[in-house]
Amino acid sequence: MDGELQVHHAIIYNTHDGIRDINFFSEGVSQALGINSAGQIVGFGRSNPRSDFNHAVIYSNGAAQDLGPGTANGVSDAGAVVGAMSIDSSGHQHAFLYSDGKMKDLGTLGGPNSRALAVNNDRVVVGSSDTDIQGHFHAFIFDTDKGMRDLGSLAPTPSLSAAFGINSSGDIVGWTGTDNKGGFGAFIYHDGNMQDLNTMISSDSGVHLDVAKAINDAGQIAAYGIVGRQSHAFLLTPKH
């Protein structure tokens, strides 16, 4: 019907209770985007389904805490939350770190927008940031000692990348341009070097890894890519 709203609620699932509705706002809409080992959940929602403005949320012990306009994308086991916060009425957003009850604007790499996408237990943050006003963006790493640093890209132009995951060793995974013809692929950033994950798998596999989304402390990587013309999920396990 015309004008009918699609209403989404955040949920949690476990094998004991199955699916439970944990809508962050009782009369609103919400989505869950991350969870830590303590069961704290982050995401976003709106108290009014017809509003255009999302609020970042952390949900813990049955209660939702509104962190302000924006989106919460990740949470560490210690409860540090990262995401993107609205900074003005024009829709610009900056990456944020919320920890110990304090909200920190992480700034940008020189462009108008940034977003934090993951954080490890040392409060090291990764994400992506505009590098100019022409639409170029790069993966970044942030810590309290050195601030936000540019991880670069494997492509000379257009120079694009984004980081989606980090483990406790500081290994980072994400997506990068790979050439000046619009090619792209999944990357791992280790010991100061970015490497195309496609160069680390068999060249005759028939697989192209597009994006690496997460990496655990064992070095296993969750990614997705293409086999033939079909999109597939992949688990990459390092050889030791």
Image (tube, rainbow, N blue to C red):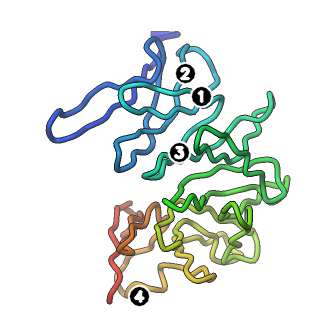
* Residue 13 location (% of width, % of height): 25, 37
Asked which quadrant contains residue 122, the reply is bottom right
Label 1, secondary structure: give it: strand
Q: CA distance from mark 4 to mark 1?
A: 44 Å
* Residue 85 location (% of width, % of height): 68, 38
According to the picture, the residue beneath numbered tag 1 turns out to be 55
**Given contact means CB atoms under 8 Å apart, are the residues at marks 2 and 1 in contact?**
yes
According to the picture, the residue beneath numbered tag 3 turns out to be 73
Q: Nearer the viewer, residue 43 or 234?
A: 43
Residue drawn at point x = 65 percent, y = 65 percent = 141
Q: Can you say which quadrant of the picture contains the N terminus?
A: top left
Residue 104, which numbered label?
none
Residue drawn at point x = 43 percent, y = 32 percent = 59
Query: Of marks 2 and 1, which one's residue comes earlier in the chain?
Result: 2
Q: CA distance from mark 3 to mark 2?
A: 16 Å
Position of 142 compared to 57: left or right?
right
Q: CA distance from mark 4 to mark 2?
A: 46 Å
Q: CA distance from mark 2 to mark 1?
A: 6 Å
**Given contact means CB atoms under 8 Å apart, are the residues at marks 3 and 1 in contact?**
no
Q: Can you say which quadrant of the picture contains the C terminus?
A: bottom left
Q: Amino acid at mark 4?
A: Ser
Q: Amino acid at mark 2?
A: Arg
Q: Residues within 10 Å of mark 3 (few under 14, many from 20)?
A: many
According to the picture, the residue beneath numbered tag 4 turns out to be 203
Residue drawn at point x = 57 percent, y = 33 percent = 56
Q: CA distance from mark 3 to mark 4?
A: 34 Å
Asked which quadrant contains residue 22, the reply is top left
